[in-house]
Image (cartoon, grey):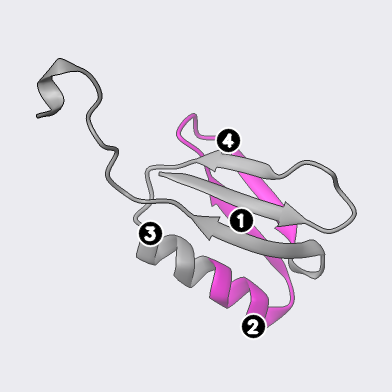
Amino acid sequence: MEITIGVQNLARELVVETEQPADDVAKAVQDALADSGTLELTDTRGRRIIVPTATIGYVEIGAEEQRPVGFGSL
């Protein structure tokens, strides 16, 4: 699943690919914003991404399932 994080005062967005379920990601974002601390996510390669919640502009959580592409997608 793809997660896009808009950060204040940055022209580019942070894009994170993760295998975490959407509900877990949403809960982590809500908890981080409530605590005024940091948002920590782990991507598909095992890297940890830590973003201070004071700089988060928005978080977009993509769909969990990818649509199949190609001839077999019918």
Real-space Cα distance between discs 3 and 1?
Answer: 14 Å
| Helix, strand or loop at mark 3 | helix
Q: Position of residue 69 (x, y in %)?
A: 25, 24
Q: How many marks?
A: 4
Real-space Cα distance between discs 3 and 2?
Answer: 18 Å
- Comes first in the chain, label 3 or label 1: 3
Q: Residues within 10 Å of mark 4 (few under 14, many from 20)?
A: few
Whether residue 43 appears in magenta in the rendering, the answer is yes
- Comes first in the chain, label 2 or label 4: 2
Marks 3 & 4, CB-CB < 8 Å contact: no
Amino acid type shown at disc 4:
Arg
Write down the residue under mark 2. 34
Write down the residue under mark 4. 47
Q: Position of residue 34 (x, y in %)?
A: 64, 83
Real-space Cα distance between discs 2 and 1?
Answer: 14 Å
Amino acid type shown at disc 2:
Ala
Q: Position of residue 59 (x, y in %)?
A: 60, 61
Real-space Cα distance between discs 4 and 1?
Answer: 10 Å
Quadrant containing the N terminus is top left
Q: Which residues are magenta?
A: 29-52
Q: Position of residue 20 (x, y in %)?
A: 38, 50
Q: Is 27 on the left-hand or right-hand side of 39? A: left
Real-space Cα distance between discs 2 and 4?
Answer: 24 Å
